[in-house]
Image (cartoon, rainbow, N blue to C red):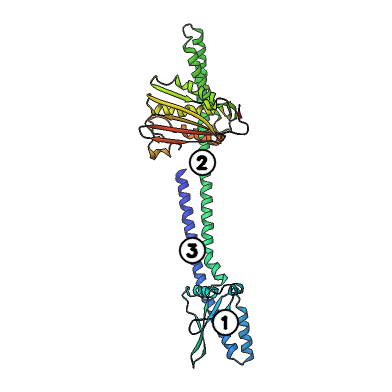
Amino acid sequence: MISSWMNWRTLMVFIAVLIVSGTIVYSQYLAGKIATEERKNVAAWVEAQRTILFSSDTVSINLASKIITENDQIPIIETNENDQITGNYLNLDTNQVKSDPNYLAQKLKQFKSFNRTPIISILSEKPFAANKYYYGESKLLKETKLYPIIQLLVVALFILVAIAMLQINYKSGQNQLWASLAKETAHQLGTPVSSLEGWLEILKSNEGNEKIVPEIAKDVKRLQLITDRFGKIGSQPKLENANIADQIQHILNYMKKRAGGSVNFECDTNELENIQVMISTPLFDWVMENLIRNAMDAIDGKGLISIHAQMANREIFIDVTDSGKGIAPAHVKKVFRPGFTTKKRGWGLGLSLSKRIVEQYHKGKLFVRWSEIGKGTSFRIILPLSANSEIA
């Protein structure tokens, strides 16, 4: 699927380059033709001016007047033989000319920058006198030159929209794949979990198992909860009010019994003691369990794991910090990508799913707060207090 997406993207870029290149070439060709025609029109206009000044033929004068009147697009500035502005101009802003004494000079400088030879009108040979006529670009010529830029923007927008749609389709397909895989996993787990429940009942009936049965029951219940979580992936979870401090302490107590004796835990949730937050408790527990398990892996069974929770500006901040080996800077931005893992076992889905649970379902944030090689890592969860959240 990735290869197909890349091929489509390459093809679209290639087609876009061809379209834009062809448009630019053709637009330049049209612009050249229009510029040639406009120079002819300016020359005809200048000649019409001379005709009116020096001709006595009524028909010629009428024709010249028509030519002069019809030029209402091309801006023209007249100078004398010394290249000084005479004050005669055409198709320029009259109000600007009157209000700004430098307006004509600025326009003349702009017209000269086009590097066109001015049209010269000989007034008399003795003494020599001639007027020069500099001209600018008509509205049509400007639009022709601007057209390829506009088309380039349109094509770029088209490519961006197409790529965005492909990415959405790709992510949608990936989400459906993971959801299907999760549901199948839940289905496969169902049978052995049911079997374990049966064996647990047998253990209960035998004497001498009073201490181990409750702990096994907790693990079986945990397996049932995991099965239920995987079965509900892809569906919208139900959020309900829960005491956030109690939820953190509950999952921490469970994980402590599964950690080695060399793992030390610290937990500070005093600031959230009476805070009720809208969460999906099974999913929130899974996120906390995943972060704590990753911390246990990072310290290799020996070190400190601390959980600190506080509230500020109607947001809950939960930091899970370990004293482990840390994450390499090059990997920090990759840890939430599906499939990325530095462990020898695992699919690299834990942090990716955790981030999705926090950010998509709970409208919060999950990110690496800090990490340093040899000193440890700290993950931060931010949960917003919704209108339904309660502060006792």
Q: Earlier in the sequence, mark 3 or mark 2?
A: 3
Q: Secondary structure at mark 2?
A: helix
Q: From where the camera sits, is residue 199 visible?
A: no
Above or below: residue 326 compared with residue 62: above
Q: Say which amino acid is labelled 1.
A: Trp
Return the residue nearer the eye: 137 or 307: 307
* Spot occupied by residue 292 in the image (x, y as percentages of width and height): 45, 27
* Front-most of residues 243 and 269: 269
The answer to whether residue 43 is above or below residue 342 is below
| Pointers 3 and 2 in contact (C-beta within 8 Å) | no
**Residue toward you, 97 or 27:** 97
- From the viewer's perspective, is 262 left or right of 239? left
Name the residue rendered at 63%, 31% in the picture.
Answer: 388
The answer to which quarter of the image holds residue 377 is top left
- Residue that carries the numbered disc 1 in the rendered image: 45
Nearer to us of marks 1 and 2 is 1
Which residue occupies 49% across, 10% down?
203
User: Can you name the residue that lies furthest to the top here?
Assistant: 207
Residue at mark 1 to residue at mark 2: CA–CA distance: 64 Å
Across and down, in percent, residue 78 comes to: 54, 81
Q: Position of residue 345 (x, y in %)?
A: 40, 29
Pinpoint residue 354: horizontal percent, then vertical percent: 49, 32
| Callout 2 amino acid | Lys
- Which mark, by number, is residue 22? 3
User: Which three-letter amino acid code belongs to the residue tagged 3?
Assistant: Gly
Which of marks 1 and 3 precedes in the sequence?
3
According to the picture, the residue beneath numbered tag 2 turns out to be 171
